[in-house]
Structure formats: C-alpha cells, structure tokens
Image (spheres, grey):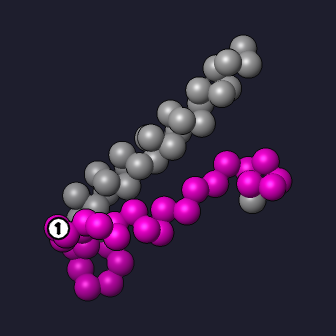
Amino acid sequence: MADDGILFSDESGLYGDVAETIYSDGCCHYNLRGYELLADSIADLITLNLKPLQLRE
C-alpha cells in the first residue's frame, strides 16, 4: 500500500506489551481501555502524517 502512496500502519502489535485486560469478551471486542489505546495510536499516526502536509501549504 505504501508503494502506491497510501498511508498505512500495521497496528497488529499494538497490544503486545500491554498486561492489562483490553477485551470485553473472549473473542474480539475491546473494552474501554482497548479502545483508548487504539485511539491514541491512531491519533499519533494522524498527527505524524499531517505534519508533512502542512509543510506543503
């Protein structure tokens, strides 16, 4: 995707070092903390990728 100019980030390892519970069930649904960690990561990625755009203006 990056080769095609599409911003992409693999967040599959986001919870690798997290010891606290991040799922609300035994399957795949995050609890509040899981969503907070994901939202923080997405916000960081957006911020990092917007800076180069601001320089172009």
* Farthest-out residue, top: 57
- Identify the amino acid type marked 1: Glu
Density class for disc 1 (Cα within 10 Å; few <14, some 14-19, many ≥20) is few
- Considering only vertical position in the picture, is 42 above or below 51? below
Between residues 9 and 30, which one lies in front from this camera angle? 9
Q: How many numbered circles does the render carry?
A: 1
Residue under the image location 50 percent in, 33 percent down: 47
Residue under the image location 74 percent in, 54 percent down: 2
* Farthest-out residue, bottom: 26
Residue 15 colored magenta?
Answer: yes
Between residues 48 and 35, which one lies in front from this camera angle? 48
Q: Position of residue 27 (x, y in %)?
A: 32, 84
* Farthest-out residue, left: 20
Q: Is residue 48 left or right of residue 36?
A: right
- Considering only vertical position in the picture, is 25 above or below 56? below
Residue where numbered disc 1 is placed: 20
Which span of residues is magenta-colored?
2-29
Between residues 28 and 50, which one lies in front from this camera angle? 50
Q: Is residue 29 left or right of residue 22?
A: right
- Image quarter in which the C terminus is found: top right
Q: Is residue 25 left or right of residue 15?
A: left
Overall secondary structure of the magenta section: loop
- Considering only vertical position in the picture, is 7 above or below 56? below
- Image quarter in which the N terminus is found: bottom right
Secondary structure of residue under mark 1: loop
Q: In which quarter of the view is residue 43 placed?
A: top left
Q: Is residue 57 left or right of residue 29?
A: right
Between residues 33 and 54, which one lies in front from this camera angle? 54
Residue under the image location 23 percent in, 80 percent down: 25
Q: Position of residue 19 (x, y in %)?
A: 19, 69
Residue 14 colored magenta?
Answer: yes
Residue under the image location 43 percent in, 68 percent down: 13
